[in-house]
Image (cartoon, helix red, strand yellow):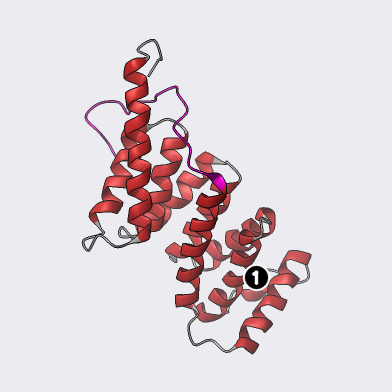
Amino acid sequence: MGLVVEKTENKPSRVGIKPVQADPAAEKDQIMELVSKQLEEALKGVPKEKLDAAKKEAEKILEGDLSWADMSQYTPEKLYEIAETGYERFKIGQYDSAEKIFRGLTVLDVNNYYYHQMLGAVFQRKEKWPEALVEYSIAIDINPKDLVSLTNRGEVYLKIGVLDLANQDLEKAIALDTKNEDRWANRARMLKEQIKIARERHVKNPGVKK
């Protein structure tokens, strides 16, 4: 499945200025908290011993002692348990290990948008923008109401200066928040402010190429 790029009437603007950046530490903490809650919800009711067993199996994968082929018959619940280890690696900055786990999970359960969402997040942390865009786009294709992927893809577009597509994604994320209370949608609102600031700066510096 390829990268999904929405069509616009005009060519998306690419503003050659660096958008205003939020505090990186606060931004990371916010994302970690929100993703953690999402995973906790998915694993609600799973006994601790099962999670511990899944962690051991994930360690075997990372060490090369257990192949993904060996896990091809695992249940969706079992795969989610392994995903928790991937998230824990992501949370402490071990992005290579997290990437290996979520790459495998996207193959074993290709239609699970969460695995693509998390692989996109790993690529985003590693500043692999094209790969992040692909994974977020797959997640959104599977689940068009995936606020997390819409917001994060919008942020990636913002990072690389494609403001029109960034704005489209962020507006979609905000529109899904009908009660005006979702924290991912609030993050999208904050990022839209960054787009506004970036465009205002561009107007003040007309020599900057689009």
Residue furthest to the top in view is 207
Q: Is residue 94 left or right of residue 119?
A: right
Rendering coords of residue 10 (x, y %): 25, 26
Magenta highlight on residue 8: yes
Which residue appears at 61% of the width and 87% of the height? 48
Does residue 11 lie above or below 78 as drawn?
above
Rendering coords of residue 179 (x, y %): 22, 63
Q: How many labels, in total?
A: 1
* Magenta portion: prevailing SS class: loop
Q: Is residue 163 left or right of residue 50?
A: left
Q: Is residue 82 left or right of residue 44?
A: right
Rendering coords of residue 122 (x, y %): 57, 53
Q: State whether residue 150 appears in this view.
A: no
Rendering coords of residue 200 (x, y %): 32, 24
For disc 1, the neighbor class at 10 Å (few under 14, some 14 to 19, many from 20) is: few
Which residue appears at 52% of the width and 51% of the height? 26
Does residue 69 lie above or below 154 as drawn?
below
Magenta highlight on residue 185: no
Secondary structure category for the residue under label 1: helix
Which residue appears at 40% of the width and 15% of the height? 209
Which residue appears at 35% of the width and 34% of the height? 195
User: For residue 178, which quarter of the picture?
Assistant: bottom left
Please give the range of residues in magenta: 1-24
**Nearer-the-camera pick, 94 or 73:** 94
- Disc 1 marks which residue? 69
